Image (cartoon, coloured by chain):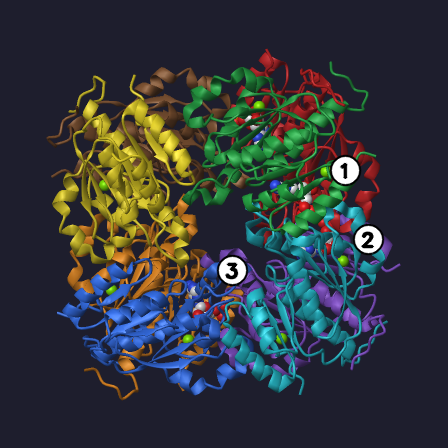
Chain colours: A red, B green, C brown, D yellow, E orange, F blue, G cyan, H purple
Amino acid sequence: KRQGFPEVIYGEGKSIEQIHLIMSKLIEKHGRVMVTRVDKEKGQLLIEAFPLSKYDSVSSILLYGEPKQQFAGEIMVLCAGTSDLFVAEEAAITAEWMGCKVNRLYDVGVAGIDRLLAYRDQITTASVLIVVAGMEGALPSVVGGLVQRPVIAVPTSVGYGAHLQGLTPLLAMLSSCASGMSVVNIDNGFGAAYQATLILKLASEGVNNEITIS
Amino acid sequence: KRQGFPEVIYGEGKSIEQIHLIMSKLIEKHGRVMVTRVDKEKGQLLIEAFPLSKYDSVSSILLYGEPKQQFAGEIMVLCAGTSDLFVAEEAAITAEWMGCKVNRLYDVGVAGIDRLLAYRDQITTASVLIVVAGMEGALPSVVGGLVQRPVIAVPTSVGYGAHLQGLTPLLAMLSSCASGMSVVNIDNGFGAAYQATLILKLASEGVNNEITIS
Amino acid sequence: KRQGFPEVIYGEGKSIEQIHLIMSKLIEKHGRVMVTRVDKEKGQLLIEAFPLSKYDSVSSILLYGEPKQQFAGEIMVLCAGTSDLFVAEEAAITAEWMGCKVNRLYDVGVAGIDRLLAYRDQITTASVLIVVAGMEGALPSVVGGLVQRPVIAVPTSVGYGAHLQGLTPLLAMLSSCASGMSVVNIDNGFGAAYQATLILKLASEGVNNEITIS
Amino acid sequence: KRQGFPEVIYGEGKSIEQIHLIMSKLIEKHGRVMVTRVDKEKGQLLIEAFPLSKYDSVSSILLYGEPKQQFAGEIMVLCAGTSDLFVAEEAAITAEWMGCKVNRLYDVGVAGIDRLLAYRDQITTASVLIVVAGMEGALPSVVGGLVQRPVIAVPTSVGYGAHLQGLTPLLAMLSSCASGMSVVNIDNGFGAAYQATLILKLASEGVNNEITIS
Amino acid sequence: KRQGFPEVIYGEGKSIEQIHLIMSKLIEKHGRVMVTRVDKEKGQLLIEAFPLSKYDSVSSILLYGEPKQQFAGEIMVLCAGTSDLFVAEEAAITAEWMGCKVNRLYDVGVAGIDRLLAYRDQITTASVLIVVAGMEGALPSVVGGLVQRPVIAVPTSVGYGAHLQGLTPLLAMLSSCASGMSVVNIDNGFGAAYQATLILKLASEGVNNEITIS
Amino acid sequence: KRQGFPEVIYGEGKSIEQIHLIMSKLIEKHGRVMVTRVDKEKGQLLIEAFPLSKYDSVSSILLYGEPKQQFAGEIMVLCAGTSDLFVAEEAAITAEWMGCKVNRLYDVGVAGIDRLLAYRDQITTASVLIVVAGMEGALPSVVGGLVQRPVIAVPTSVGYGAHLQGLTPLLAMLSSCASGMSVVNIDNGFGAAYQATLILKLASEGVNNEITIS
Amino acid sequence: KRQGFPEVIYGEGKSIEQIHLIMSKLIEKHGRVMVTRVDKEKGQLLIEAFPLSKYDSVSSILLYGEPKQQFAGEIMVLCAGTSDLFVAEEAAITAEWMGCKVNRLYDVGVAGIDRLLAYRDQITTASVLIVVAGMEGALPSVVGGLVQRPVIAVPTSVGYGAHLQGLTPLLAMLSSCASGMSVVNIDNGFGAAYQATLILKLASEGVNNEITIS
Amino acid sequence: KRQGFPEVIYGEGKSIEQIHLIMSKLIEKHGRVMVTRVDKEKGQLLIEAFPLSKYDSVSSILLYGEPKQQFAGEIMVLCAGTSDLFVAEEAAITAEWMGCKVNRLYDVGVAGIDRLLAYRDQITTASVLIVVAGMEGALPSVVGGLVQRPVIAVPTSVGYGAHLQGLTPLLAMLSSCASGMSVVNIDNGFGAAYQATLILKLASEGVNNEITIS
Ligand SMILES: Nc1ncnc2c1ncn2[C@@H]1O[C@H](COP(=O)(O)O)[C@@H](O)[C@H]1O
Ligand SMILES: Nc1ncnc2c1ncn2[C@@H]1O[C@H](COP(=O)(O)O)[C@@H](O)[C@H]1O
Ligand SMILES: Nc1ncnc2c1ncn2[C@@H]1O[C@H](COP(=O)(O)O)[C@@H](O)[C@H]1O
Ligand SMILES: Nc1ncnc2c1ncn2[C@@H]1O[C@H](COP(=O)(O)O)[C@@H](O)[C@H]1O
Ligand SMILES: [Mg+2]
Ligand SMILES: [Mg+2]
Ligand SMILES: [Mg+2]
Ligand SMILES: [Mg+2]
Ligand SMILES: [Mg+2]
Ligand SMILES: [Mg+2]
Ligand SMILES: [Mg+2]
Ligand SMILES: [Mg+2]
């Protein structure tokens, strides 16, 4: 029976003991586990406890085990610069661990449009695009206009003042004039990667339906 | 070269003359056109001007021409009741016109969970799900927990008081604990259908990448 | 003369000295006292000062003395998982200390509806239900649809981004389409338990009015 | 099997035809029906179509049929003045139609505290209290301090400026320092009456649990 | 020429050095100075530097020198309990230092209306009333209804959740149905005392205008 | 025993019949009455019904009868221009009817500071100042800096966009750096005049307290 | 002595009579006048009264007289499409009437970046740029990245749902990562043009300061 | 080819290592660099690493190298007092480093209008004005009324309660009734200086356009 990807723990607000316990259970059951939102201190302690695990300090993700499957297609993760990396990497590492090929494009802000357009070929051949943006959140609109593939926009909490801890790019992305785009919660790289993976999964498995493309 | 679905007009705030002009151009170029947010009065006048067009008063959509292609798979559109129908039908009719098979499931609110679960088989076999909800916007969370397919949530402006013209279900859907879900703007059935169609399009065309499913 | 439950202290923002003083007075007057929102450090110091008291670190409640009465009926406290426990336990322990029987049901999120429904019998036989939920706050709507008893919904501050420190589930619960539900402040497990207890108290004492049920 | 009170229609945004159709079905099935949020014009047309129905223009409620049962106890509905009457009466008439005895106390604002206190005896003997207030929403706090019975607070949309269409009293009531109070949506007299009725229903039916009051 | 009360420093965000410098200047010029928002640590250091000064840890005010004048009349400062004391005392001490007689009434919340009313005589004979309230901010409305004197309402940041750091009582007070009341910023006991003092000053000096009371 | 100014009706949302009824009662009892927020149409009908009444279409106030007393001192009402006149006149006419002398200064916006300063003498000799401002609400801060008398600030709903229907000047006035200022609700000219009158009343009656000015 | 551009009337909320009166005065004094926010009906009546005036129904501006001066340089006004035209034209016509040369570029949304970039030469040679955008307000960020000239961003009220009547693009523009950009109020094409003109005025007049460019 | 001012680093949230690396690159390429938002501790370490650099603790700016050019004209930076200095200095130092002459006017709040007006001559001869204000943000409106030059308003995060961390002065400035003013993000002294510099740059370079001033 299909069960999705239950082997994920949301580490925020959980103690080392709680995470340790759940990890042990999930490793026993699934042979693998991913924990998001693990700060450096906890990460250090957990890789000591689970020597086979790996900790990534940019995304704050702790990984144990390998992808169980590989999906066809490619997810592109885009962002503007160094400050949004923690979200972009949460998305990228999650997607990889779930079995997707990921192409990172990380220095392409809208205020320097030429750099973004230099990668146009890669952008237009991606299967699904995760576009991470803080500040005013304009990048997804521009990317959405370049492609005919699903775009998942992720606002980030990076900014100040009128940025409202990410509410501003969140609302801006939802108001975007580019079609084919949807939005997840502020800083939710995980959620974007999860949905992107479900899309590749659908495409990989094939749709079990007789209607064929004309 | 494929150019997406450019033959759509956003009718809100456009005069009959403006819509007439753009419709004529798009029909000439593409042989078809869809206009959203057309009120009854304008709809009446436009079907007189374009006798081959059809007007649907629930979704406020005016259609001219047929889908150019048919994509494999099936989009399920769910909502709770009569008040959200205008959004659900904007989604359903848009998706059909873009070439998708649509399965409507329209009387399934979370406060009567048994009715929703009675359709569990249909729900779990859909390729992509568009879940439309006003009030507190809880339906997508429940549906998201039932499936391993992408869920696109659409909050609606139906409610009052603490509902804040749809901001409340919008924020609630973004905060959902169900994975694999993303969100579009309030009442934006069109946007949800557009992205759902892009997903079926991707699955139909196949992903042009060598990695194969294990 | 009946005086309600005056022997409760709201510990937040009070110094050890202030709490100590008020506790002493209330113990002298009522033989018992309950202090909510007591952090671990203060809790430790206070059980040293009052060796007959008990401190619960999940709910941050300090208890001294026993319920003065037992009300008929049963309050069910529901929540989705570990992160909302601190609120659920504030509700449960408060209700118990005020003289109510409490049934806890703590691992039943809406994104896994089957687990919730597995407890349907218990749910429908509860007299009053306190439903605690963070994130999008959808659980009370589902529970409210299952029962014909009063439901008191408690939003929690657990979430991030669009969750707005609990404002989002608060507004969502107020917009709920399930009837028979009312809402208390964010994280206010105490307030929910207090009202639930008043309901059982009313039912236990009987309504002093001649109209009889037909 | 008991099914609650399904015979209620939310009239807002429904056409005469839609209401007529649902009314007919519900009358056939239950012998009675209540429609809320029916404006005067629709009300006039519907009493012509259903001569046995009654329309109340203050609460905008259309009634057909009588209560099926009478619950013991009494609900008191309080409000400050004429402008909140439409909500208070929505609550009062709903509660009566569901089988409750209702005591109205309608001219008792907090800025004239003596008038409120003149009714102290009646207030303290009510089984459940519904307190309706616009403006700053202070009345429920004062009433909540006078009684040891459940108080359900209903903020109204009556006010201007800083009142924010009722958001201000809504948030104020949720922040109240009076215990035993919960809150429903702005102008939701119906919801308050529904929960109050469930409380009297519980008290009337008796709690099926062996624990007895000490 | 009279110049108001320039000898006040707002200590928040100023360093010890900055405060020391400004204090020295003001003492030299006016022979006295008051510093508000001085935390305990700074307070300790400043009374060492200025041995003739006094520091009050409840209001966080540092005083040097005496009132230059005494105004006729009396300001009553009211609040509900211990948590709002820091604001009430900021008001009371400011008013005293500016030359007003102050009557404190500090344990009179609206949820225990009898205690408030026990002081009715004192309340109605006050010249100006400063009413401090956190939570839902209902106290000024009740007090405003009891008197025919100016009421200045001060919302406080004491509360949680729907209280929005004091925005809720602020907006509630502005929406109050009691006449003769105005409002100052959240926690601004100083501002309330300043205006109250200006009122007594006006009354003390007499209005230089020929129109006489009938 | 004096009871304040009970002979005022808030006309907003009341029908002609309701106003007529209350006016009759108040005229019978007090010999006079004032009705605020009366639109032109209602105003016309009411002066026909009460030929001795006067209707002012700028302030939307209906007056019947004369002031019962005259207070010493003078209230100055300031505003920037024609668009805020409806609020300024609500304040001015209310104050006059309650027995105050009013000095109007109506064309003095902060963006033309010289014009304001040209009236400096009048401004500094006023007993109480009501400062009405829409847009960014800066006028009260400037005026407050010119005087040592109480300033009551009234934000108005005149503006657009970032002005948020008056919330912006309301919040700005509350954040003002000028001391001695307090604020009333958006467009609440009546409330400002009421408090200003209470201040003159206090000054006129004299404070019944032995402390004398030094 | 030059006094700026005093000969402008804000027509919103002013009656025909008021506008007529002020126009007459300004024409007498300056020989010219501009009225913004004049709806079609008023516009019709005013050109009848002032046959030498011209009314533009897109911008809702009424003009009388010619520019008094011509400034060197060129203002470019950009927007995405037909729905924002009313704001773009308010800016363009204002700037022209104040004496600036205006270059309009009106069909260049970010979701079709190639079209925008096709005009790159014109964009980079403009002296000042006014960028008008509704929806998510991303256009100014992209334009700001292309130029080294001042960019004035104007959010519009065109959009729905999460767009919050223009607050979303307003906040997004303020959070922009492009340097050299500032923002005016929602729909305030006039304000943007006014500041752009002041910039050209400064450049035209030359800065009266000895420091020279190196 | 002209490249603007790329040699600026936004220091907030960057580690010493990251800043060190980028500084080295920019110094190599441009011979100079400016880093904003560098706290004292980082500043200390960086001047040790780059002995030729200078750190300013008021503005939190680290500078290396000299202006490459000097623009004609003068930027005036105004603010009310000590608490807004950190923003005013971010603006002033940025503008100087970019090649502008800056005139600081720092003790001129609106509540003491005479002090501001004492500098009227200087104010009216500035080429561009940057007006920094916390609290209610009224200063730019007054200054804007005094000059016929571009005013760039900068709201600050200095204030409390209704000030909403700077949102209140931000929205107030956007709603200002003074023409010729635009606004940047809260505390964004850098952005204001950048735009002001672009304006002087335009004026210094001269507009390459044939139209001449009449
Ligand atoms: N970074 C993240 N953001 C949002 N949701 C997450 C994140 N990481 C994990 N989750 C979700 O949280 C679930 C686990 O929650 P828990 O049971 O509290 O550990 C996973 O199944 C995911 O759906
Ligand atoms: N109901 C709708 N909601 C949101 N976007 C829409 C809707 N209908 C059409 N659109 C988008 O608007 C574009 C057309 O806009 P316009 O050029 O203004 O007609 C289409 O290409 C769609 O991307
Ligand atoms: N606690 C306070 N809240 C608000 N304003 C205050 C407070 N204390 C002092 N002030 C005002 O701040 C001014 C002094 O500000 P400053 O020059 O920054 O010390 C005084 O004249 C008062 O008007
Ligand atoms: N204090 C500041 N506030 C806003 N933007 C800034 C500030 N300092 C630098 N910047 C901008 O940030 C850019 C550098 O960002 P980064 O590449 O993250 O260092 C610069 O080119 C400026 O446009
Ligand atoms: Mg696209
Ligand atoms: Mg799922
Ligand atoms: Mg139920
Ligand atoms: Mg009570
Ligand atoms: Mg009063
Ligand atoms: Mg003053
Ligand atoms: Mg640029
Ligand atoms: Mg100016």
Which chain is mark 2 on? H
Residue farthest to the right?
H1
- State the quadrant of the N terminus of chain E: bottom left
Disc assigned to residue B30: 1
Which quadrant, please, contains the C terminus of chain E? bottom left
- Whether ligand 4 has any atom under 8 Å from the Cβ at mark 2 is answered as no
Helix, strand or loop at disc 3?
helix
Q: Quadrant of residue G97?
A: bottom right
Q: How many marks?
A: 3
Neighbor class of circle 3 (other Cα within 10 Å; few <14, some 14-19, many 20+) is: many
Q: Which residue is mark 2?
A: H26
Q: Is residue E11 above or below residue E210?
A: above
Q: Is residue D78 above or below residue C114?
A: below
How far apart, in angstroms, are the residues tagged by discs 2 and 1? Answer: 52 Å
Q: What is the secondary structure assignment of the residue under circle 2? A: helix
The percent coordinates of residue B74 (x first, y second) are 64, 22
Left or right of E73 on screen, residue E1 = right
Disc 1: which chain? B
Labels 2 and 1 touching (C-beta < 8 A): no
Protein chain holding label 3: H
Q: Please, is residue C149 above or below residue E155 in the view?
A: above
